[in-house]
Amino acid sequence: MTGLTQRRREPGEQPRSTDGGPAHLDLDDLETRARSALPAEVFDYYAGGADAEVTLGEAPQAWRSWRLRPRVLRGVDHADLTTTLLGTPAATPVGVAPWAYQGMAHPDGELATARAAAGAGALLTVSTSATHTVEEVASASAGAPAWFQLYRQHSPVHTDDLARRAGAAGYRALVLTVDLPVLGRRRRDLRNDFALPAGLRMANQPAPGGAPAEPGPPWTAADIGRFADLSGLPVVVKGVLRGDDALACVRAGASAVWVSTHGGRQVDLVVPSAHALPEVVDAVLGEPGPDGADVEVYVDGGVRSGTDALVALALGARAVFVGRPTVWGLATGGAAGVRAVLDGLSAELAHAMLLCGVASPADAGPDLLVRSGWLPR
Ligand SMILES: Cc1cc2nc3c(=O)[nH]c(=O)nc-3n(C[C@H](O)[C@H](O)[C@H](O)COP(=O)(O)O)c2cc1C
Ligand SMILES: O=C(O)C(=O)c1ccccc1
């Protein structure tokens, strides 16, 4: 931890941190390497956002509009990242956000990401729009806890079936993504005429050729309880940006609320997650979930460093999730690439916590933060 002298690296040896932990994480470099590794339209699909991409660009900046107030002389000589998320144990509060079409990034797709998350002890969220089935990804996780993210399907029968399958396959929670009543307008994808490449399929879709289904009515808060019953799982509502919506979700039976702009991919000019988070935390703080335990709040969007994650925890998030950093990890290094991203972010978070006198995720609070109002805008 303290070594000021470092031995000379062997030629070709990757840099490692002074405490022998994971090598320095350079997400900008990883993104650049992913851009070269991927076909341009695939990179654009992963990287892009809605409309003019204002929200996409603001997301990381929004975390950085806070400044930390480190605590000193508190006797903290170790940061313990372990936590529980809806009772599920995790080695770190940094989890993997659900993202679609992972087979475009690596032949093993979601299976590689599942192995990486299991190795890192990070909670995995698996997308409905995966290139492997609900059950295949569950087996790749080999007993490590994972959550399943559910999209409303064209046929309500199919949606219900996916919820039941997630329960049967051993997922520990059902994440209802509610910010995608329709797909956002993504200019890059429209320009590229983006479609899932030949040879890959949305593995959770029913085989083509069935009878055309009647679309069901749009989801409402009442569906939260219904999906909890169908799956037998606690429900997390993902894509909430307002306190009133968060409270409505909780009153309808949600166990947790996940603050998200969907990575700036749905509607542009929405408030960054970092700014919506305090309002949502205020609205549901101390509210009991369906099992009587306190409702939990999670957040994603533009978390790119340990200090970004610490700001999110200090604002009241119990976990932070990352999307694109794991995309770049998978595209450049498969399971090992994702693992390096997750371990790197957790190592950065532990380091930032130690430097700020924070012993555990629960020990982070708003006293750690001040608005950087004095900064030139
Ligand atoms: C390529 C891509 C695909 C995504 N697919 C899904 C999805 O299938 N389901 C979902 O709930 N969110 C999806 N998201 C949103 C992520 O879960 C998450 O909210 C977002 O990526 C977080 O922002 P970040 O990428 O800045 O970390 C997707 C995001 C990306 C970048
Ligand atoms: O691209 C996305 O952000 C996304 O969530 C999605 C939605 C439907 C199908 C594939 C991906």
Image (tube, rainbow, N blue to C red):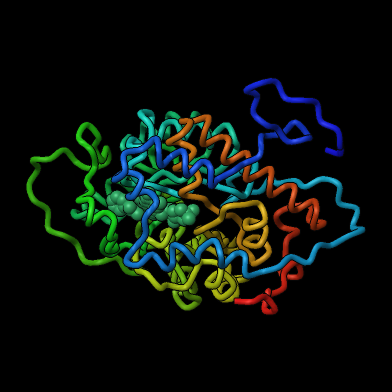
Q: Residue at x 53, y 37 (%)?
A: 117
Residue 78, given in percent of the width and then of the height, sits at 82, 45
Q: Is residue 191 above or below residue 42?
A: below
In the displayed structure, does residue 218 sit left or right of residue 256?
left
Residue 105, given in percent of the width and then of the height, sits at 37, 36
Q: Residue furthest top?
A: 10
Residue 85, given in percent of the width and then of the height, sits at 58, 51
Residue 290 makes an appearance in the image: no
Image-quadrant location for residue 135:
top left
In the displayed structure, does residue 113 sit left or right of residue 166?
right
Q: Residue at x 62, y 70 (%)?
A: 65
Q: Residue at x 12, y 53 (%)?
A: 213
In the displayed structure, does residue 93 sit left or right of residue 46?
right
Q: Is residue 280 above or below residue 149?
A: below
Q: Is residue 116 above or below residue 210?
A: above
What is the quadrant of the C terminus in the image? bottom right
Residue 148, given in percent of the width and then of the height, sits at 41, 46
